[in-house]
Image (spheres, rainbow, N blue to C red):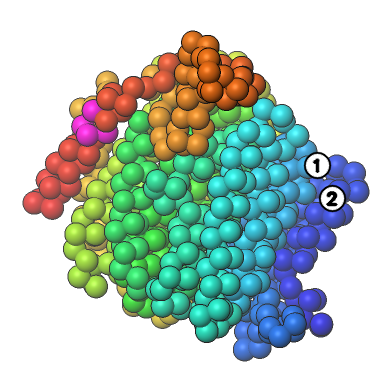
Amino acid sequence: MAELVTYAPLTFVVAAALVAVVGRRIGAAVMLAAPVVALVQLLSVDRAEPATVEYFTFQLTYLRLDNLSAPFAYVFVAAAFVAGLYGTTLLERRERISALLTAGFGLGVVLAGDLLTLFILWELKAVASALLIAGSDAGRRGAAQRYLMVHVLGGSLLLGGVVWHLASGGSLAFDALDLSGPTALILVSFLLSAAMPPLHAWLPDAYPSASVAGMVFLSAYTTKAAVYALLRGFPGLEILIVIGVIMALYGVVYAVLENDIRRLLAYHIVSQVGFMVAVVGVGTATAVNGSTAHAFAHILYKGLLIMGAGAVVLATGRSRLSDLGGLWRRMPVVFVCTTIGAVSIAGVPLFSGFISKELAVYAASTADYTWAVQLLKLASVGTFLSVVLKMLWFTFGAEDRGLVLRPLPTTVLAALVLAAASNVLLGLRPDILYNLLPNPVDYEPFAIGKLSESIQLLGFATLAFLLLIRRLTPKPALTLDTDWFYRAAPLLVAARLRAARPVGGWAAPVHAATGAVRRRADTAWAAVRAPDAPIDTTSSTAVLGAVMLVTFLAVLALGLMS
């Protein structure tokens, strides 16, 4: 099979095998060389001739590079290079191997042309990602196990849907699917990997548990591969508009409430992917462009933000906003680059997020989904409030707490500058991105009306921050989310059983049999809670969330009336 020479995912697998046996310096060079070689391979692929292989009675398409998969493939390779540069001196051997495999299998997902190949690479990516989360730190294995548990469930749904679809007379071809019983299972699997609430809690649980460099890799592949799968399989499915809007609002509210900077950014992945999912539901050619463009830009600016937050954690040893402050003078490169990432995610004009997010919202407006447009704009206001204002202010501004800073590796700073430059370049030259999109683009992002509307909304968000700054001041706390159901609830039940009085009669054997579980409950429950922070009560979380939503609505109304 001569096509294997141009099969870029295989390059990452070979690189992972090399990293496993060579020294650290050579391993770092291999990690940076792999995405460069992969890019050359992608550029040499004949788009008119997908690569196939016979498997029993099936013809599997393992390499299909077309107008939809190409932009995802290119940005996946770019992300692997930047993340690899960032992690050159940070990733230990196991993490390097699993990071390369995550990138390779993620790339394989977007190149898969049939459902069986998709499933195989989907599951391999989940395993590689779980290994990346775990690394060699025993303290991270719980989060990795929970991540793997959730994604094995998603993979089971995907396989069940594929088998049922075939048994019902469907094809293995991975193209647009009509919604039915079997394809509904496939859809749920995609949405689980896209982090749809309430199936999203694996993301803010697992991603911040990874190393600072590992989280950069994780942010690029799982949710964006799911967005690609939705674009390929379910464009125009209107229920996705509702789901996407819920994701956009849910993620941004929790980001406003969050104290840990890495968890805050994890929730913003949920929110920003919501924009992409909502526009997939619109389904027009412009919508496909908008969702693809936003996924492309999101990988770049979110990677930049996570690298900036990781640099702060590396230098200070702290990740909670309540422990940080006043770092802009002492970490100027990190501050400037993180600010570029923040204004990009908020959709500030002349940065990458503006040209992608506005195209996505424009697609919804041209299809007359006015309600969705207004709510997505509301989420944009919340993004500006929570990232540009809250995160930047309480990390780099506010009061200098006199923290002792450790020096950062040169490669970390180089990766930050490279990622920041790419976000500025796309913001100033949107045609670079637009020319990569699946369909011709007939949209002008720098129209006066668009610029004026964006500036007004961001101005009102700034006003909301000034009015609510006391409420937004970070406090040591642990935010409750739906991960409670698979992490804390069973432990609480076990703790209640442990505290119960001894029972007699027929129930005594059951009570004795659960003794081991009950004895471990206290230790496990203590691990769930932060040792120096009480868990927020549901009522306080709900009250602050309600305040933020009402404020966002008021700000949006003022912006529309002006």
Task: State yes or no: residue 545 in magenta.
Answer: yes
- Above or below 449: residue 468: above
Relative to residue 144, is residue 205 drawn left or right?
left
Q: Badge 1 local density, few (<14 within 10 Å), some, or many (20+)? A: many
Considering every residue shown, the one lying at the far left of the view is 561
What's the magenta region? 543-547
Looking at the rendered structure, which numbered label has been put on residue 19? Answer: 2
Q: Nearer the viewer, residue 307 or 431?
A: 307
Q: Is residue 390 above or below residue 106?
A: above
Residue linked to disc 1 = 93
Q: Secondary structure at mark 2?
A: helix
Point 77% across, 38% down: residue: 92
* Separation (CA) of disc 1 from disc 2: 7 Å
Magenta stretch, main secondary structure class: helix
Query: Quick one: quadrant of the N terminus?
Result: bottom right
392 or 482: which is nearer to us?
482
In the image, residue 59 lies at what x, y percent?
Answer: 68, 84
